[in-house]
Image (cartoon, helix red, strand yellow):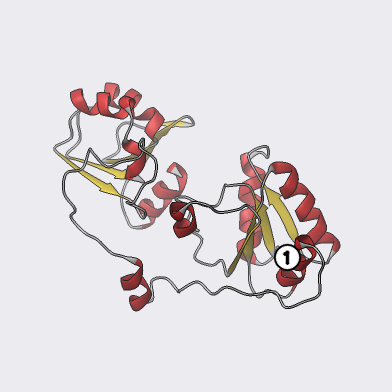
Amino acid sequence: LVDQLAATLTARGLTVGKFYTHAKDTDAPVIVCCNPSLGELARLISPPALWIADECHKTESDEIKSVLETWSPERRVGVTATPYRSDADERLSLFDSLAYNYGPAEAIRDGVVVPPRIVHYAGAAKDIDTACVELIASAVGPGVVDAISTADAENFATLLADAGVRAKSVHSKLHRSTVDKRIAMLESGELDCLVSVSMLVEGVDFPWLRWLCCRRPIGSRVRFAQY
C-alpha cells in the first residue's frame, strides 16, 4: 500500500519518498509511511506541517498515540471510507471534527462508483463450487474471487482452470513479484480472474475490475462496504 500510494502521488507531480521495511527515505517533501514504521520515522525527522492518516480508523493504538504526543504535526487529517467501526480498537479519537463527508449516494450520483448488481444463479448445479464456476465462466471482464484460505484459493483456481477459465491464485505465501505479475496479467487481459485471500480488499484500488465472487462469508458491514 505504501508503494501504491507513493506511485499515485508521484503521478500527480509530487516528489515522494517512502518509509517502511524496504525503503527509508527521509529527505523528500512528501513521505509515505506505514503505521508500524511511524515511530522510527518520527525519531529521524522534525514534525511535519501536515500529517495525513489514510485508513485512519487504524490509528487508534497506543503506539501511534505515543508517537503523536512528542512528535506533533501542525495539522492532521484522517481519511477513511468506512468511519463506522464495530471494533473498539478502531475509533477516530485522534480527529476531533468532520471536515468533509462524501457518501455512497453522492458517489453513485456522480458516477464515481456504480451500484452493486447481484447476479443470481439459475442453473442446475448441485453444489456451490459448480455454480460459482458456471457464473464465472460466463462473466465479462476481469474479476476477483475471495477465497476462504490459501488452500481454498489454490484448489478453486485449479477448478476454474480445469473449466477453461484463466485463473491464478494470489495469497501471502507467494513472493511479492509473483503477486504483482499476476495482478498485471489480470489487468492486461492475460488472466480472467484472480483467486485471492483477503489481499485485494482494504486500501486497494482496481477500478478496472468488473465482478467479484465472495466465497468467504461476509458478516461485517465494513468489509462488505469495502468490497
Q: Is residue 227 rendered to the left or right of residue 139?
A: left
Does residue 212 appear left or right of residue 201 in this picture?
right
Q: Residue at image x 62%, y 60%?
A: 144
Specify whether residue 16 is in view: no
Q: Is residue 203 left or right of residue 152?
A: left
Q: Which amino acid type is marked by label 1?
A: Cys
Tell me the residue that label 1 is attached to: 132
- The quadrant in which residue 27 appears is top left
Res 190 → quadrant: bottom right
Query: Where in the figure is residue 58, as x and y percent of width and height?
Result: 36, 39
**Residue 222: image x %, image y %?**
43, 53
Q: Is residue 17 visible?
A: yes
Q: Is residue 15 above or below residue 161?
A: above
State the residue lying farthest toward the left.
74
Q: Nearer the viewer, residue 176 or 167?
A: 167
Q: Is residue 137 above or below residue 84?
A: below
x 35%, y 37%: residue:
88
Residue 69 placement (x, y as % from top left) = 19, 25
